Image: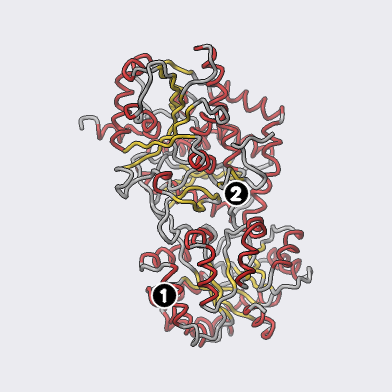
Amino acid sequence: MKTKFQPDENGYFGEFGGAYIPELLYPNVKEIEDNYIQIIESEEFQKEYRGLLKDYVGRPSPLYYATRLSEKYKAHIYLKREDLVHTGAHKINNTIGQILIAQKLGKTQIIAETGAGQHGVATATVCALMGMDCTVFMGEKDIVRQAPNVARMKMLGAKVVPATSGSKTLKDATNEAIRYWIQNPHTFYLIGSVVGPHPHPDMVARLQAIISEEIKWQMKEKTGKENPDTIIACVGGGSNAAGAFYHYLENEEVELIAVEAAGLGVTSGESAATSQLGEVGIIHGSKTILMQDEYGQIVEPYSISAGLDYPGVGPLHAFLFDSKRAKFMNATDQEALDAAFELTKVEGIIPALETAHAFAVLPKMDLREDQVIVINLSGRGDKDLETYIKHLDA
Amino acid sequence: MNTIAKHLEQKGRNNLSIYFTSGFPELNDTQKVIEELGEAGVDFIEVGLPYSDPLADGPTIQDSSTIALRNGINLDIVFDQLMSIKDSNKTPLVVMGYLNQVLKYGEKRFCEKVVACGIDTVILPDLPMVEYENHYKALFDSYGINNVFLITPNTSEERIRKIDEYTQSFIYMVASSAITGAKGEISDQQIAYFERIKAMNLKSKLIIGFGISNHSTFSKACEYANGAIIGSAFIKNLQNNGIQGIASFVKGIRNA
């Protein structure tokens, strides 16, 4: 049976979602829609998917009790260590699943978009693993600010194509990937977040749901209870948050906090806090909350972190915001940097800049001493060292 | 009867339609371009509403949209421009934009303005059939507006039949599975597709678009359909030769 957090037959979560695609893409999307649930739920897929997650990705990722951070904030803080999985971020949970789906559909050429480069690396990795051809679209601006990931993708055999239109970031990389998909309908578009036309948001959420599946039994093992009081995750498109929230969506006792990037400040004009600045609109084939001007032109977002620099948000998250199931908070560039340095000093973990936003809301919360919090530590910070070095002595 | 359908009915074959981006190359060129195209004897004109993220368009139209937006174009200005030539212009017009522009402008307000400009045909490439059936059909019908559907070599016969049923203007036949952009020739594969559609004996008129760029591709397309649409090649010409180059461009398409 479907829950209210799963899409209806037309791909809507509440009023958000759908598949607003040109006719040229209809057969491609339809092929996936007709097959994805059946494939994901098949025994064969589950065996391969879980086998690779265990032996290749290194799952389950640990749930780590952060003693010193907990002492500092006077609460019980657990970190879901997605930063420790292969390629350094949660993105690979999705790419492993989708490459298997692509295989079942007989696809051999893979395309993807990437912002911070983590999804690009995770896609290039599974393509190398399966011997498939890989093309990754990446904003020209992101190619510069995430150079180590560009080098990794190239070493893994992927072709990296710069997106030179618009803001030259994630939005434009996604536009270019969709355009290429239209021109080359035999390719498989391995989308990196819970965005895009139905069924992509649902497919990616199901593949990232492994995160909350593990949190449940790991919490039980460590505390005797499956449920934390609060789960915190950063949101750009929203895939790590979707994964961390997934098995708790219907359990209203668990507070869900989504943290968006406020850039230089929510009202500064240089921000990516979509829920605060956006209105209902259509982006990349999905009706969602979108940053746009009075004529519906999409506004260029800004964040220090390439992975959160997106003017929309996945339709599930738009619904979580609209229905108030999740609380949306935000953190500025500076707050994220401070949080990254704090986590590094207190726990010896350098988080990705995206992830640092999730930690940055801790000082803004009224925490109870017995409050059990899980923060999804979605990625590691190696790729952001250049930015961190710039701020080391600042 | 729909304005475009009526024209196609009267003229029959060899209809030439030109797409251009409003507000390009200069903000107030919209009216001049329409006037020149009319004088050059174009059958109908697609007025592009510039969008920041035109997913179904290639780089040429995308770049022209970026320039038009930088020129300060917006829906209010375009509608004012179209209103100002409503009486003088005799060439049927179609507006082409993206659904988010309609949503944000207000669906009813959008329809009112379109109708006020004497236009009854819209192309919204990212409006999918299911949303049209569930919502937009009733809305557009109430304003006497017809939505143009696209079909591609991969569109199923069942879907084409449904589109034929919904169509009161024309069916936009995408020449290949590709986004807009001048290609220069028509392949045997494309001809097989044109013949397959022609053999379906649809009630609607067919106009071929995407990849039509010169006299040879235009005349080839006209063998299988009621006419063809040229977009990117026209925009390139407009960029290189300006408004004064429109007449000779159209002449070159019509006659080798």
Q: Which is nearer the eye, A174 or A194? A: A194
Residue A96: horizontal and vertical position, in percent? Answer: 58, 32
Occupied quadrant, residue A108: top right
Occupied quadrant, residue A214: top right
Q: Circle 2: is it few (<14), some (14-19), or many (20+) Cα within 10 Å?
A: many
Q: Amino acid at mark 1?
A: Asn
Observer-side mark, 2 or 1, equals: 2
Residue A150: horizontal and vertical position, in percent? Answer: 42, 39
Residue sitting at 30 percent across and 43 percent down? A265
- The quadrant of the picture occupied by the C terminus of chain A is top left
Label 1 is found on which chain of the structure?
B
Disc assigned to residue A18: 2
Residue sitting at 42 percent across and 81 percent down? B243
Vertical position of residue B195 compared to residue B242: above or below: above
Vertical position of residue B14 compared to residue A133: above or below: below
Vertical position of residue A359 compared to residue A322: above or below: above
Any part of residue A193 in sight: no
Under circle 1, the secondary element is helix
Residue sitting at 61 percent across and 47 percent down? A187
Any part of residue A136 in sight: yes
Disc assigned to residue B240: 1
